[in-house]
């Protein structure tokens, strides 16, 4: 069957949907990486804070205390940056997901149109075949009917 404009549009829509799907997968992967980085930072901060608590109980000099506090503050800043990056990435994922859904909807529309077109073609073909069969049967009947007509002299 020859490719039609609708087939071409369907193929292009499928390609666009697939590209949008790959982009969505990449955005989700980035989202997971940011979440993991944030979790590592938070775990590291918790361990460092625990060390500081232990040192405070045991006794710590003011310079080491200041260093610990500054390091914890820099970890807090890094955690906040990771949180902002995660929020931005979440927005990217939502946007990309909507884009993929739009492409999927477009593909579904073209696919539905293609299915309707194919169904109409099958129906037309079926009707054509039925008409040819009816025509053939009528011709056989007419030919057969003429030979079945008895002449008056025969009995």
Image (spheres, grey):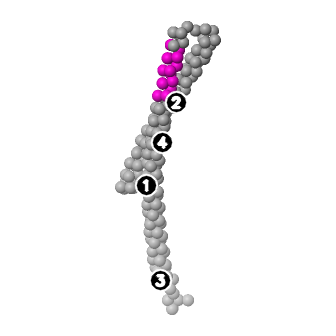
Q: Nearer the viewer, residue 57 or 119?
A: 57
Which mark's residue is nearer the viewer, 1 or 4?
4
| N-term-proximal mark, 1 vs 4 | 4
Which mark's residue is nearer the viewer, 2 or 3?
2
The residue wearing badge 3 is 146
Q: Which residues are magenta?
A: 67-81
The residue wearing badge 4 is 94
From the top left corner, tell me how far across and down residue 94 is, in percent. 48, 42
**Distance (Cα) linking label 1 and label 3:** 54 Å
**Distance (Cα) linking label 2 and label 1:** 38 Å
94 relative to 49 in the view: left or right: left
The residue wearing badge 2 is 35
Find numbered disc 3 in the image and state the secondary structure of the residue it sits on.
helix
- Magenta stretch, overall SS: helix
**Distance (Cα) linking label 2 and label 4:** 16 Å
The residue wearing badge 1 is 110
Residue depicted at x 45% and y 72%? 131
């Amino acid at each position: 069957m020859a490719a039609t404009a609708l087939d071409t549009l369907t193929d292009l829509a499928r390609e666009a949907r697939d590209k949008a799907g790959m982009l969505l997968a990449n955005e989700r992967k980035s989202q997971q990486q940011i979440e993991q980085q944030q979790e590592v930072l938070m775990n590291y901060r918790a361990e460092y804070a625990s060390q500081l608590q232990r040192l405070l109980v045991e006794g710590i000099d003011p310079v080491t205390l200041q260093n610990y506090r500054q390091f914890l503050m820099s970890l807090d800043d890094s955690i906040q940056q990771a949180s902002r990056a995660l929020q931005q990435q979440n927005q990217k994922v939502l946007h990309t997901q909507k884009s993929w859904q739009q492409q999927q909807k477009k593909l579904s529309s073209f696919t539905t149109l293609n299915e309707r077109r194919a169904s109409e073609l099958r129906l037309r073909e079926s009707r054509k075949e039925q008409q040819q069969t009816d025509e053939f049967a009528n011709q056989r009947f007419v030919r057969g009917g003429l030979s079945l007509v008895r002449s008056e002299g025969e009995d």
